[in-house]
């Protein structure tokens, strides 16, 4: 029977008014979530949910009985211990409930459901059996969730029953990215039949689809780093301009592509191999909502397909067959119905990654139309209209992997960032980035926007810029910063590229061209390339433009290891090696954090541990610098490899460092500190026997110059080479005008050392200048000239015996035989002069045998004829035949003449 319980309270003096509660014992409804006890925990139920999985039903063979009532009045379903905020929720088939007259209302974040209204036990059972749990978190908390069911028959609530959900996270490998891509195999293939690409897809299960905007053509092929694009094929029943941007979507469970045909008002289901599976047409077979079909989207759980119809002003829902991929029309959500407004001429359609909201874009009004989606039924309910920032016309949009942000490229070269409320779906503008402002580039006519699966970069294909821009993304705020820009100067396949798609793991990116030459671009992630120049300061490896980012679905990193390696011959991999040994090293900073660095002996490798966040590891990674102190560095490109671990798996990336060596000038040294002493009339003397050349980055020299750099005396100073020059060296002629001696020719450093130590100095003058000579040496290696070294030569003149010398001869007079008084000058043999220079005696032979006497003018040097003593012409002069030498005695009193013909000495 029934019982009444009365409650009163007292403060010690007065008692309160009594209140009562009647308990209807034995009249409760009895609920079992597991009527078959399949989970072994009846009447409760156990199940599991794995990260990335679909909806999980929370009962099996549910039973619901009430001995005293045929109807129930209400029920509540409550997620009692939510861990992941709005990422997890419970949902019921509200369409089914409405059919039973049961109203459905959801609590905050979808963590509770309240059912109200009189309905039979079986109707409530069916409704409760449709309750599901879902979690869209990329990092779900693994605490088991408890979902409590309570039903109420209007008299008393049932005992609660609990569905326990074991939650399992899936560990994805951490990532390190720079946002940079490099062209890989298969890139550059001509898309010969393509006019303009309207859709380019890469599916989760590694398929690719290219759709033509003009002609009803498509190509499908396996996604690969070296794909082979087949011939484009037509789609039966499609026509020109049928396939607009966004008209294609894919479902990997059935290997099916879906294409909306705007002109023919059709919907095509196409197998991955291009085979047509199904064609649905507006107004045929009960299908509605395909008039001007422009865009399709498959729900993330693959349960439903949605089509935006431009001319129907609607979004149409289709159920998907998970086995065949075929579609069944469910209903149309049209503008003006059920509170829907703004849904005029929808052109684009997007689903949030968690599947809770669907967003249509209306270009005519520049509005986002947001719907809430029932994950069980696919039904949509209108949330509201939200302005496109600045009234801009949206060309493309993409959600971040966590669904928190929506990125929209516009026709006016602007990229808008919206935040999304994951519970309500409401959009709010967070940031606007403009082409050419604050370092942002590549935003013109952004027809393709992609978000890296790790959420750390946003990629934009811009056909006017022929570029692929990578923008760094803050996963917490969704805000962007300029990153790396690739264009057709880097890869000509980007010329007029208007469409792009990225693979589910982020390791492959395709582009398709807008105008001739229309080619497929195939890219894979690659580190940045930086250059270290010999003798430069330390080079930052992972910061600056293309700064490295670290991603991990669990948000936890256990270690980061960075090491110096070398790039393999293909330029694609890092292999162990430090060609310059201890001369090359890494440096870093861990200041301001909890990270500990453990380097190896030479700082060729370092491991970081103990960090508290991805951001902290990222900060340390961006502080890494590379330096090489060698004066002759090995120019093999280095790979600075970074490997990050989350304790279960690793991710890696290397940045390439090109090494630019500098041709260092050779050096000279070793010259004797004391000067060289040279005395007049010394022989050629070695200038330096200890001079020593060297070159840090060459084993040979090409030239040497030896010059008298100070006090050179032309005509007396001589530089020369002693002995034979070493092989390869040519000794030039000493330049008597400049005092320079050149050695040329490529030869070893040892050969040039021997040559320099063979250079001599000599002074040819008998009255040399006493000014000290400074001899300078330099050597050359190619265009590089060494330092200058010198040695001073102290030249000492000596006192020589005096000599008479004539600095010049000036013509005074000419005497000819028989000219005037002059006789006896025919066949002159000798001349003798008195010591006082006043008398001159001339001997002659042959026809003029005799002796002529002249008087000499001491001032002018002129001669005056005095007499001629001819053979046999005067008494006593009979032995003057063929006179030879004449000699005057020192006292000038006697003249001695030898006559060869008479063989006499005449006095």
Image (cartoon, rainbow, N blue to C red):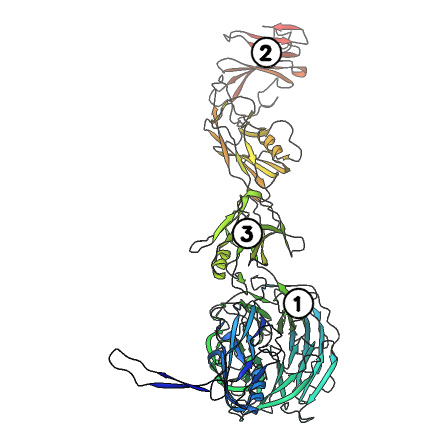
Q: Residues within 10 Å of mark 2 (few under 14, many from 20)?
A: many
The residue at which mark 3 appears reads as: 532
Give x and y (percent) for residue 137.
53, 71
Res 413 seen here: no
Q: How crowded is mark 1: few (under 14 residues within 10 Å), some or many (20 or more)?
A: many
Disc 2 to disc 3: CB gap under 8 Å: no
Residue 526 vertical position relative to residue 230 in the rendered view, above or below: above
The residue at which mark 2 appears reads as: 886
Q: Nearer the viewer, mark 1 or mark 2?
A: 1
Which numbered disc flags the more N-terminal residue, 1 or 2? 1
What is the spatial separation of the Cα atoms under label 1 and label 2, in whole angstroms? 113 Å
Residue at image position (69%, 64%) is 185
The residue at which mark 1 appears reads as: 522
Q: Which of marks 2 and 3 is in front?
A: 3
- Element at badge 3? strand
Please indicate whether residue 752 sits to the left or right of residue 619 in the image: right
- Element at badge 1? strand
Which numbered disc flags the more N-terminal residue, 2 or 3? 3
């Amino acid at each position: 029977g029934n019982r009444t319980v009365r409650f009163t309270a007292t403060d010690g003096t007065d008692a309160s008014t009594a209140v009562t509660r009647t308990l209807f014992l034995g009249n409760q409804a009895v609920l079992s979530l597991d009527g078959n006890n399949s989970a072994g925990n009846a009447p409760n139920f156990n199940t599991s949910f794995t990260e990335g999985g679909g909806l999980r039903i929370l009962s099996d063979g549910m039973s619901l009985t009430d001995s005293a009532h045929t109807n129930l009045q209400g029920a509540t379903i409550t997620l009692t211990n939510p861990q992941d905020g709005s990422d997890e929720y419970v949902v019921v088939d509200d369409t089914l409930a409405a059919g039973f007259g049961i109203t459905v209302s959801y609590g905050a974040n979808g963590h509770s459901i309240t059912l109200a209204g009189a309905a039979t036990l079986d109707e409530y059972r069916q409704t409760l059996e449709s309750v599901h749990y879902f979690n869209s978190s990329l990092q779900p908390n693994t605490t088991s969730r408890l979902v409590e069911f309570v039903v109420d028959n209007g008299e008393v609530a049932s005992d609660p029953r609990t569905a326990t959900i074991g939650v399992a996270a899936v560990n994805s490998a951490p990532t390190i990215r720079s946002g940079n891509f490099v062209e890989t195999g298969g890139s550059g293939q001509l898309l010969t039949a393509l006019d303009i690409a309207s859709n380019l897809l890469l599916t989760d299960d590694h398929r690719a689809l290219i759709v033509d905007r003009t002609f009803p053509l498509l190509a499908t092929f396996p996604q690969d780093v070296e794909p082979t694009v087949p011939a484009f094929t037509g789609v039966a029943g499609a026509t020109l301009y049928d396939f607009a941007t966004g008209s294609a979507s894919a479902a990997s469970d059935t290997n099916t592509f879906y294409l909306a045909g705007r002109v023919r008002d059709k919907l095509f289901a196409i197998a991955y191999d291009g085979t047509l599976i199904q064609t649905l047409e507006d107004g045929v077979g009960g299908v509605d909502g395909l008039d001007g079909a422009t865009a399709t989207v498959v729900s993330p759980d693959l349960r439903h397909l949605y089509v935006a119809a431009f001319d129907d002003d609607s979004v149409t829902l289709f159920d998907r067959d998970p086995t065949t991929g075929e579609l069944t029309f469910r209903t149309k959500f049209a503008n003006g119905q059920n509170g829907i407004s703004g849904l005029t001429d929808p052109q684009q359609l997007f689903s949030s990654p968690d599947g809770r909201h669907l967003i249509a874009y209306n270009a005519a009004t520049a509005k986002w139309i947001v719907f809430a989606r029932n994950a069980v039924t696919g039904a949509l309910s209108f949330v509201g209209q939200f302005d496109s920032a600045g009234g801009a016309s949206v060309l493309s949009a993409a959600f971040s992997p966590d669904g928190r942000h929506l990125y929209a490229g516009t026709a006016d070269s602007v990229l808008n960032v919206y935040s999304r409320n994951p519970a309500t779906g409401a959009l709010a503008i967070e940031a606007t980035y403009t082409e050419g402002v604050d370092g942002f580039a590549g935003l013109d006519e952004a027809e393709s926007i992609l978000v890296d699966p790790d959420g750390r970069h946003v990629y934009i294909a811009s056909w006017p810029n022929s570029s692929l821009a990578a923008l760094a993304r803050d996963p917490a705020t969704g805000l962007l910063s300029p990153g790396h820009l690739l264009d057709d100067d880097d890869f000509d396949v980007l010329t007029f590229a208007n469409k792009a798609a990225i693979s589910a793991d982020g390791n492959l990116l395709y582009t398709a061209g807008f105008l001739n030459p229309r080619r497929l671009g195939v890219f894979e992630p690659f580190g940045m390339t930086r250059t270290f120049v010999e003798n430069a300061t330390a080079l930052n490896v992972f910061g600056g433009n293309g700064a490295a980012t670290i991603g991990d679905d669990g948000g936890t990193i256990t270690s980061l290891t960075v090491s110096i390696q070398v790039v393999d011959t293909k330029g694609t991999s890092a292999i162990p090696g430090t060609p310059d040994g201890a001369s090359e090293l890494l440096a870093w900073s861990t200041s301001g954090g909890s990270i500990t660095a453990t380097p190896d002996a030479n700082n060729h490798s370092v491991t970081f541990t103990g960090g508290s966040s991805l951001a902290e590891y990222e900060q340390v990674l961006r502080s890494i610098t590379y330096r090489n102190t060698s004066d002759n560095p090995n120019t093999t490109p280095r790979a600075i490899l970074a490997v990050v671990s989350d304790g279960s798996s690793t991710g890696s990336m290397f940045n390439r460092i090109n090494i630019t060596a500098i041709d260092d000038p050779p050096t000279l040294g070793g010259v004797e500190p004391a000067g060289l002493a040279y005395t007049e009339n010394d022989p050629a003397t070695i200038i330096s026997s200890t001079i020593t050349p060297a070159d840090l980055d060459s084993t040979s020299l090409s030239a040497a110059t030896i010059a008298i750099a100070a006090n050179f005396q032309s005509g007396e100073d001589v530089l020369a080479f002693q002995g034979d020059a070493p092989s390869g060296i040519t000794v030039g002629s000493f330049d008597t005008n400049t005092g320079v001696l050149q050695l040329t020719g490529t030869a070893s450093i040892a050969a040039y050392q021997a040559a320099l130590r063979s250079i001599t100095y000599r002074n040819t003058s008998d009255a040399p200048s006493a000014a000290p000579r400074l001899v300078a040496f330099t050597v050359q290696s190619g265009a590089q000239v060494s330092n200058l070294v010198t040695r001073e030569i102290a030249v000492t003149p000596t006192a020589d015996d005096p000599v008479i010398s004539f600095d010049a001869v000036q013509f005074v007079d000419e005497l000819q035989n028989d000219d005037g008084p002059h006789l006896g000058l025919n066949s002159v043999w000798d001349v003798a002069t008195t010591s006082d220079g006043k008398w001159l005696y001339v001997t002659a032979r042959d026809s003029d045998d005799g002796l002529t006497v002249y008087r000499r003018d001491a001032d002018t040097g002129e001669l005056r004829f005095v007499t001629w003593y001819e053979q046999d012409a005067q008494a006593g002069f009979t032995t003057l035949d063929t006179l030879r030498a004449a000699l005057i005695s020192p006292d000038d009193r006697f003249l001695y003449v030898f006559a060869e013909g008479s063989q006499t000495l005449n006095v």
